[in-house]
Amino acid sequence: MRFVGCALAWRPGEARDRSSALVVLDERGGIIANAFAAGVEELAGAIESYAGGEGVLVGVDAPLSIPNERGTREVERILSRVSLPAYSASRKMFGEEVYPEEFLAALERVGIQYTDYPFPRDREQRAVVEVNSAATLKVISFERAGSDGRLEEIREPRYRKGNKAQRAAALREVVEILWNTPGLRLRTGNLSDDLSAPENVDVSRIEVTEEMSHAELDRIMNLVEGTLAAYTVLRHWRGRDGSLVVGTGPEGYVLIPAPEILRRRIAEECRAAGVPYV
């Protein structure tokens, strides 16, 4: 069984011009590969190659079902109420061609189906789900803070925007969090510290500094987000540390890690808003 995280370049203006990152985990949480690919067919082909005919669970860090013409989806409003990061996506953003939907269609052509509930411990499934890497990162940080932590008080590293010094510091912080995340093994023998390599880059061995270009920092950011996406689906598949699906496939949903205390809080918001969860 393989677990693939995809940091998809999905936003208008970047979707057809920038590469997306893929990170592949095995059942033990070890990174066995990562790569960059551009275009939905190339991405789908790479994922199929990594699966190698086995079961595969793909977590895509992007909104995959966008039914709303304007505004935000209900799932985003739920996440915002509990102080979790959320996308802001509507069909008006894209016009006639919705890139995430094109990606789903390409995955379906290689036998990977969109679902809003992948089954834990099922090694035969070949499915793709929506995740949110920023939400996963905040949940991991919340768990590290212990039972006294409050989501509202958990600081979110600002690695997407800012000057190079700020972004580099934030990315170093995120890599350190990943390094110390139970069930995730960042360093494996087949990865290298060559950031310019087209595949199999070990972000834990790269010295992230303000001397890097924004393009290099973006590359590290994408690998980090892909790793968080892969961890999210692996954690759900293991079925022991807690996860939650908020929303439904047609209306938009997200799979997030969720310890019991957070699960109860999100469930309360979902019940109040009439939003399904499982």
Image (tube, rainbow, N blue to C red):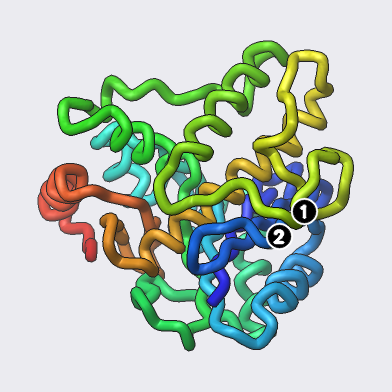
Q: In the rendering, at what x and y percent does residue 111 appear?
A: 62, 86
Label 2: state its secondary structure: strand
Q: Residue at x 27, y 24 (%)?
A: 152
Horizontal relation, residue 152 to residue 250: left or right: left
Q: Residue at x 66, y 53 (%)?
A: 188
Give the number of the disc on residue 241.
none
Amino acid on which the number 1 mark rests in the picture: Asn
Asked whether residue 105 is in view, the answer is yes
Horizontal relation, residue 148 to residue 13: left or right: left
Q: In the rendering, at what x and y percent does residue 14 appear?
A: 75, 44
Give the quadrant of the C terminus. Answer: bottom left
Is residue 47 placed above or below 159 in the rendered structure? below
Horizontal relation, residue 169 to residue 199: left or right: left
Q: In the rendering, at what x and y percent does residue 40 appear?
A: 74, 66
Q: Residue at x 88, y 41 (%)?
A: 196
> Label 2 neighbourhood size at 10 Å, few (<14), some (14-19), many (20+)?
some
Q: In the rendering, at what x and y percent does residue 153 appear?
A: 28, 20
Q: Which residue is mark 1?
A: 200
Label 1: state its secondary structure: loop
Q: Examine the image and state in which quarter residue 141 appears.
A: top left
Q: Which residue is mark 2?
A: 33
CB atoms at circles 2 and 1 under 8 Å apart?
Answer: yes
Amino acid on which the number 2 mark rests in the picture: Ala
Horizontal relation, residue 86 to residue 179: left or right: left
Alpha carbon of mark 2 to alpha carbon of mark 1: how far?
A: 5 Å
> Label 1 neighbourhood size at 10 Å, few (<14), some (14-19), many (20+)?
many
In the rendered structure, which disc, 2 or 1, sits on the residue that comes first in sequence? 2
Is residue 113 placed above or below 6 in the rendered structure? below
